[in-house]
Amino acid sequence: MELDRRSFLKGSLVAGAAAVTGSTALAGCAPNGSTGVGSGATNAGDEYVPSFMQREPVGEPEETVTADFVICGAGGCGLAALIQADDLGLNAILLEKKAQAGGTFDFAAMSFFPNNKYAIEAGFKVDYNDLIKTIMTYNHYIPSYTLLKNYMSETPETFDWCEALGIQFMYMKPQPGQPGPFGLGVSAAFAGGTGEGGTGGGSAAVKVLVAEVEKRGLDIRYNTPAKELTQDADGKITGVLAIDETGKVIKFEAPAVLLCTGGWGSNPDFIRDLAKVDPDRVISPGYDGRDGDGVYMARKAGCAWARGDGTMMFYGPHIPGPTWGEALNTGVYQPTLWVNEKGHRFMNEGLGNFAETGNAIRDVKRLFVIQASPDLDTITSDDGIAGFGASGAGGSESPKDKYKEKLEEEIARGNDHIFVAESIADLAAITGMDPAVLQATVDRYNELYAKGEDEDFQKDARYLTPIETGPFYAFECCDGFFTTIGGVKIDEEIRGIDEDGNVIEGLYVAGCDTGALCGDIYDFTSAPGEQSSWALTSARLVAKHVAAKLNG
C-alpha cells in the first residue's frame, strides 16, 4: 500500500491508526521570532560582510541625554547592573527594546553560587582553584582562568546581595548523593513566584529586581532599543544611539556602556553563520527579540570574537508544538531508539545530561525519536522508562499519567511532526527513511535488548526497550536550546577588547553577549546555572569597575 506522507491522522491514538501526520520538511523549527534566513553578502568594495553584520544606519541624533553609565538590555544582567550602579551613586540609564524587562533571564532555573553562605555553614567550602581547573578542562581551556576566578570569587557576595533585595532560593545546601556540583552545594534554584512557593525560576527573580528599580525610581527606558555605539577619534566609547517608541534617535552620552542584550537566539543569520547550525533545525522556548544587538554593536566598534563564539545552550530533542518542559516533550525525550534522517542509530540516547545530549544531535539533519506502543504505556504509567522521568530533558512536568493523553490531543490538532504506522516499513516510508535501513536498525536494537547490553553505544541497559509491538511512533524533533553564550571577546575586567588584545575604552560586555565562560557546550556538568549567575555577577562587577574609574 502506498502511503501519503502528508495525510492527517484520523484514527485515535488508542486504536493505533496507521495514518500519519507530517512531512519531510521540519517547518516551524526555527527559533522564536525569526522572520527568515539571510546570507552573507559582498559590498561594493568586494569585502565580505556576514549577513548578521548587515544593518541599516541609525541616522543623526535629535536629542542628547547625559549619564555616568548606560546599560543596554533589561534582562537579569541589565537590571542588576542598574541597581548596583545606584548602590554606588552612579547616574545610570537602562535601555530596553521591548515593553517589559526580563528577557532571557526569565527562563533561568538555577544559579551557580559556589561557597554561598549556606554551603559554608554546611561545611562544604569549595577550593576555587580546583573548581576552575575542572571547568577549564571541560571547556578545553577556552575560557580565561583569571576571568573565571574574578567572577567566581564574587558569587558569594552576589548571592547575599540577591537575598538582601528579596530574591528567594531553594536547595542552597549541598544535596548528599547528588552528582558533581549538586553534591557540593554550588548551585541554588530560584524560588517563589508561584503563589504557593516552589521553583519560580528566573522570572521570580526578575519581578524582585523590577520592583526594586521601580521603588528607587531608577531610569529605565522601555521600547528604546540601543542601535549603535558612538566613539571618539581614538576609538573610546562616548555613548550609544537608540531609537525611542516615537522613532526619535537619541544619543545617550556616557563614558561607560554595558552591552547585555540577551544574545542572538532569535536571529537565524547568527545561528547559521556564527554557530554553524541550521536555523531551521533548532527551536527555543525563549522570547523573540534576541537579535544579537549587543554583539553587532560591539563588533562594529572593533571588538574581537571570543574563541567560544558560537556556543548555544542546547538541551536536546524538542518536538515543535508543545512547550519545553511539558509532559508531552518530556515523554518524547525518553531514551528509546533515536535515529537520523537515514534511519541509522548514532548515539547513547540515555545520557541524562541535557547539554551533552543537545550537542550530540546538533548536526543531525533530521532526528526521529522512535517509540513502540508498549513504550507509551511504560512512560505514562511508570513516570518514564526506568524512572527517566523529566530529569533528562530538564523539564518540569513528569510524563506520568499524562503522556498518552497529551499525545492524542497533539495528534488530533494535526501536529505534522508526529508519524504513526502499524509496521516499521510503513513508518520508514512516511518519514522518508529507507525501509531496509530502518528495519536493520530496529533489528539490531532488539538484538541488543535481548542481550541486555548496548554493545554499540553503551547506553544503560535499563533504558533498552524492544521495538516490536505496533503501532510505532516517530517524533521528528528539533534540537532545543535555551539561549546563546557567544560573541564578544572580553578581558578579565569584562571590558571589550580588539584583535590585538587592546581594551576598547569605556565598553563592557556581559551576560549572553560574550562567550567568556564556555567552550563549545554549556557546562552543566561542572557549573550548572553558570549563565544566570554570570549575568548577575558580571553586572555587579562592571558597575563596581565603572564607579571606581569615575571616582578616581
Image (cartoon, rainbow, N blue to C red):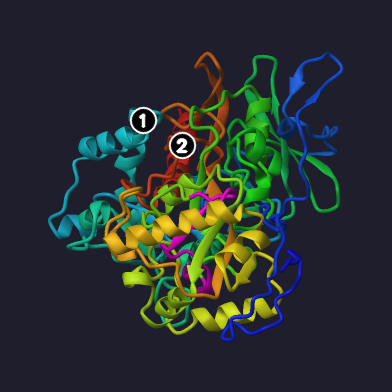
Crowd tier of the residue under label 2, counting other residues whose Cα lies within 10 Å: few below 14, some 14–19, many 20 or above: many
**Residue at left 47%, top 50%?**
345
Based on the picture, tell me whether residue 416 belongs to the magenta stretch. no
State left or right for residue 56 relative to residue 212.
Answer: right
Q: Which residues are magenta?
A: 326-344
**Residue at left 40%, top 69%?**
191
**Up/down of 343 relative to 472, above or below:** above
How many marks can you see?
Answer: 2
**In x, y percent, where is residue 292?**
65, 41
**Residue at left 26%, top 34%?**
133
Between discs 2 and 1, the one toward the N terminus? 1
Residue type of the residue flagged with mark 1: His
**Quick one: SS at disc 1?**
loop
Q: Quick check: can you spot residue 380?
A: yes
**Up/down of 230 relative to 511, above or below:** above
Residue occupying the far front of the picture: 1
Q: Identify which residue, 405 or 288, lies in the foreground.
A: 405
Residue indicated by mark 2: 520
Q: Quick check: can you spot residue 319?
A: no
Give the distance between the C-alpha atoms of the residues marked 2 and 1, in whole angstroms: 9 Å
**In x, y percent, where is residue 75?**
57, 53
Question: Which quarter of the rendering shows the N terminus?
Answer: bottom right
Dividing the picture into quadrants, the one containing residue 192 is: bottom left
**Up/down of 193 relative to 90, above or below:** below
Label 2 close to label 1 by CB (< 8 Å): yes
Residue indicated by mark 1: 140
**In x, y percent, where is residue 222?**
70, 55
